[in-house]
Image (spheres, coloured by chain):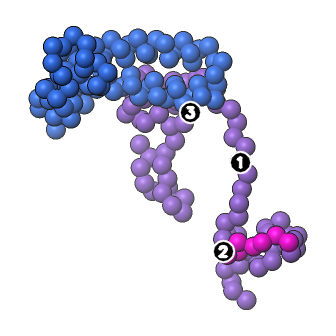
Chain colours: A purple, B blue
């Protein structure tokens, strides 16, 4: 068996990721072992912690809460973290 | 290299940017009075900065080209990105 299936990002064929057998009526995606679809529920932003206009345009956002470091792929922590 | 803070158009651009940010916030929070008040305040500062810039360097949007000029000033002054000329 392919060893990759136990590394979290790969799943055994036929499983949707929840451990239950896959519904046969559900059409599998071609990359069955790739990332799955997701539903996202972000919290509503509130009006607070604003940057002044000079800092806002320099940081690329008006909102300090949305000024997050850009982390490159693989979560290596490398890349621009301003 | 020209320091962006020394560039007179930066005054216009920074208000333009915060207006856009506030615009996006208000799209999902249309009743947020604090954000509305901030938008109005920044709009006044933006208009003021734009007016000052245009009086000195010429129009930066075509809608202000026809006002206060005797010709189509839009093409007669340096473009904003011609920094040496501004």
Quarter of the N terminus of chain A within the rendering: bottom right
Q: Which residues are magenta?
A: A25-33
Category of crowding for the residue at label 3, using alpha-carbon neighbours closer than 10 angstroms: few (below 14), some (14–19), many (at least 20): few
In the image, which disc is placed on residue A65? 3
Q: Label 3 near label 2: C-beta < 8 Å?
A: no
Tell me where residue A64 appears, x and y as whole percent.
52, 31
Residue corresponding to mark 2? A31
Nearer mark to the viewer, of 1 and 3: 1
In this view, the residue in front, A80 or A42, is: A42
Q: Secondary structure at mark 2?
A: loop
Q: In front of the other: label 2 or label 3?
A: 2
Q: Earlier in the sequence, mark 1 or mark 3?
A: 1
Q: Secondary structure at mark 1?
A: loop
Left or right: A57 with respect to B51? right
Q: In the image, A16: left or right of B73?
A: right
Q: Are marks 2 and 1 in contact (CB under 8 Å)?
A: no
Write down the residue under mark 1.
A40
């Amino acid at each position: 068996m392919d060893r990759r299936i136990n590394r979290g990002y790969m799943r055994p064929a036929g499983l949707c990721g929840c451990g239950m057998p896959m519904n046969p009526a559900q059409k599998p995606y071609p990359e069955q072992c790739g990332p799955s679809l997701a539903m996202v529920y972000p919290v509503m932003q509130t009006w607070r912690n604003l940057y002044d206009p000079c800092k806002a345009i320099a940081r690329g956002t008006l909102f300090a809460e949305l000024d997050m470091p850009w982390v490159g792929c693989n979560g290596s922590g490398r890349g621009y973290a301003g | 290299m020209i320091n962006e803070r020394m560039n007179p158009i930066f005054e216009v651009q920074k208000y333009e940017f915060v207006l856009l940010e506030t615009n996006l916030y208000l799209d999902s929070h249309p009743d947020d009075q604090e954000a509305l008040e901030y938008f109005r305040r920044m709009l006044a500062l933006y208009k003021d900065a734009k007016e000052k810039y245009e009086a000195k360097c010429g129009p930066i949007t075509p809608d202000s080209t026809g006002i206060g000029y005797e010709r189509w000033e839009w093409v007669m002054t340096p473009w904003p990105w011609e920094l040496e000329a501004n």
